[in-house]
Structures are given as C-alpha cells and as structure tokens.
C-alpha cells in the first residue's frame, strides 16, 4: 500500500511541477502572495518556476533514491507546509486558478494540505 501511495505521490509531484513550468504557470502566479516576493526578493514567476523545479526534483527523488525516502518524504512534507500560505492567500483573494474556480473549492483546498503532508510522511516511512 505504501509503495502505491509513494508512486502516486511521485506522479502528482511530477505532474504539478510540469504544470508550474508550462500551461499552468500563469495561473499559479495568482496564488503567490505579494509578501512572498518581498520576502524572497524576486518576482511571482520565479517563485512559480522554482517551486515547479523543486516538485520535479522531489518527485524524481522519491523514485530514484529509495534509501533516502524518509528524508525525501520530510522534504516533500516541508514543501507542502511552505506553500500553504499561498493556498490561504488564494482563498482569501477569491481569484481563480486552474481547477479552483469557486470559493468552495478554494476553501476545500485548504483542508487538502494537511492530507498531503500526512501522505508524504506516511508513504515514505519504512
């Protein structure tokens, strides 16, 4: 069961990462809070691209580095925690992004984040 969950997580990360770099890139910029650009001293597009690259790397690492799966799982969980403020910003501003085109969907998305964190940690335990 954990192997299937890990594999599905890897696919999710690679797909999301690819989306950040391609067709969903513009939409994901909407979810980046303005304060994040000031804190990181960069623009929204760079934040989206870097987060996409990180997702691709973590998705690949989940498959390619089985001996490091606990560390990779912890890194994935940390990524999911790090992007949560963007989810909150997105919900509070009420702006549409790909797949989240209503207040109800944006609000529900907030409750998915802890599930993703738990999924990353559970699926990478030995």
Image: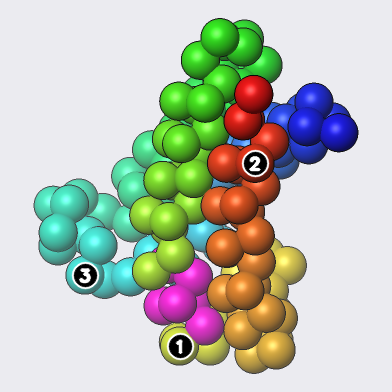
Q: Which residue is drawn at the image coordinates 43% and 56% (left, top)?
A: 81
- Secondary element under disc 1, as helix, strand or loop, is helix
Q: Which residue is drawn at the image coordinates 33% and 70% (left, top)?
A: 33
Vertical order, 53 against 42 (above or below):
above
Residue segment shown in magenta: 86-91
- Secondary element under disc 2, as helix, strand or loop, is helix
* Residue 14 shows in the view: no
* Quadrant, the N terminus: top right
Tell me whether the residue at label 3 lies in contact with that at label 2, contact meaning CB atoms closer than 8 angstroms: no
Q: Position of residue 101 (x, y in %)?
A: 70, 80
Q: Nearer the viewer, mark 2 or mark 1?
A: 2
Using residue 121 as the reference point, say whether residue 33 is left or right of it.
left
How much space separates mark 3 and mark 1, taking CA atoms?
14 Å
Q: Position of residue 121 (x, y in %)?
A: 57, 41
Q: Residue furthest front?
A: 126
- The disc, 3 or 1, on the residue closer to the chain's N-terminal end is 3
- Which picture quadrant has residue 7? top right
- The disc, 2 or 1, on the residue closer to the chain's N-terminal end is 1
From the viewer's side, name the closer residue of 74 and 93.
Answer: 74
- Secondary element under disc 3, as helix, strand or loop, is helix
- The disc, 3 or 2, on the residue closer to the chain's N-terminal end is 3
In this figure, which residue is indicated by the disc labeled 3? Answer: 35
Q: Position of residue 6 (x, y in %)?
A: 72, 31
* Residue 120 shows in the view: yes
- Which picture quadrant has residue 61? top right
In this figure, which residue is indicated by the disc labeled 2? Answer: 122
Dot 1, how many residues are within 10 Å of its Cα: few (below 14), some (14-19), or many (20+)? few
Q: Is residue 42 magenta?
A: no
How much space separates mark 2 and mark 1, taking CA atoms?
30 Å
Name the disc covering residue 92, or none.
Answer: 1
Q: Position of residue 49 (x, y in %)?
A: 43, 40
* Quadrant, the C terminus: top right
């Amino acid at each position: 069961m954990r192997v299937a969950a890990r594999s599905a997580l890897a696919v999710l990360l690679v797909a999301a990462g690819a989306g950040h770099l391609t067709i969903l890139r513009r939409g994901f910029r909407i979810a980046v809070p303005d304060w994040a650009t000031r804190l990181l001293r960069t623009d929204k597009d760079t934040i989206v691209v870097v987060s996409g690259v990180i997702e691709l790397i973590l998705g690949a690492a989940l498959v390619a580095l089985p001996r490091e799966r606990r560390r990779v799982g912890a890194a994935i969980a940390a990524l999911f925690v790090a992007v949560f403020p963007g989810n909150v910003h997105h919900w509070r501003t009420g702006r549409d992004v790909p797949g989240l085109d209503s207040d109800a969907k944006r609000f529900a998305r907030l409750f998915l984040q802890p599930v993703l964190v738990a999924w990353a940690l559970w699926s990478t335990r030995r």
